[in-house]
Structure formats: C-alpha cells, structure tokens
Amino acid sequence: NSGGVTTEAGVVIGLEALCNADWMQPDVGDRFVHLIAHEYVHVQQPGARLEVEQPTLLYQTLLEGGAEYVGELISGQTANAHLHRWAQGRECALERAFVQDSRGTDLSQWLY
C-alpha cells in the first residue's frame, strides 16, 4: 500500500499504489521520476536507515522534506501539488502549529 520504500537492499516501488495515486502528478511517468528520486535520497540519508522507535515530528519531516526537496530538484515538480493549493494563505498558522508539534511524536496530522 506504499508508493515507495527503502530497504537495506535498495528501493522498492509499489506499482499499484503509485499508478493509482491520482492525487500526485497527473502523468504516471512524472510520478515515477519524482518518487524514484525521492526514495533514492532516503537511501543516502543515514537517519533514514536508523530504527527510531518514536521519531519526533521534526526528525521525520527533515528526512521526508529533504527527500522531497531533492526529488523536486530532479523531477522539476512536487509530488503533492494539491497541498500547495490547500496551504495557500495558511502558511503562518501552519508554521506556528508545526513548531508547537515538532518535538512530539504524533505524526498523524503532518505526515503519511
């Protein structure tokens, strides 16, 4: 049920999930490019290979944000364009809420 994950053996892409992810880029080929770039960044992140039982929101968003940023540089687009539209005009409120939650371990309002 995941579009992509990393393991010690490398990157695993979930074709069914990725092909059905219509909330991502409209073109399936663009989804592949972005997701593969994103997951290969995780392969390079030492923190992504650690088994952290309850990572803080800040820790996990640095990992995901780093992978998303480099994935965007490589592919030329973000994976979640709908979130940009949703967040427009709410940036300050979102930043304040994130700072308040960042040291906690509840990721449910922010990730995945």
Image (cartoon, rainbow, N blue to C red):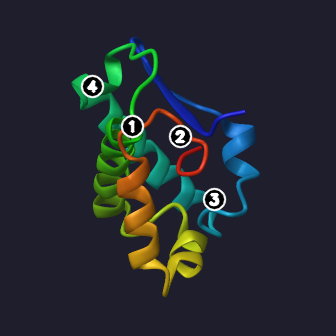
Residue bearing mark 2: 107
Q: Earlier in the sequence, mark 2 or mark 1?
A: 1
Q: What amino acid is at disc 1? A: Gln
Instruction: Tell me the residue at 52%/61% (across/down).
Output: 30
Q: Position of residue 61 (x, y in %)?
A: 38, 45
Instruction: Tell me where residue 92 sits by quadrant.
Output: bottom left
Query: Viewer-nearest of labels 3 and 2?
Result: 2
Estimate the x, y position of residue 8 in percent, counting from the top left.
Answer: 39, 12
- Quadrant into which the C terminus falls: top right
State the CA–CA distance, disc 1 to disc 4: 9 Å
Q: Quadrant of the N terminus?
A: top right
Tell which tag, 2 or 1, sits nearer the viewer: 2
Give the mark nearer the N terminus: 1 vs 4. 4
Q: Which residue is mark 1?
A: 60
Label drawn at residue 98? none
Relative placement, left or right, of 24 versus 39 is right
Q: Which residue is mark 4?
A: 47
Do the CB atoms of the residues marked 2 and 1 lie less than 8 Å apart?
yes
Q: CA distance from mark 3 to mark 2?
A: 28 Å
* Of callouts 3 and 4, the N-terminal one: 3
Which mark sits nearer the N-terminus, 3 or 1?
Answer: 3
The residue singled out by tag 3 in the image is: 28
Which of disc 2 and disc 4 is earlier in sequence?
4
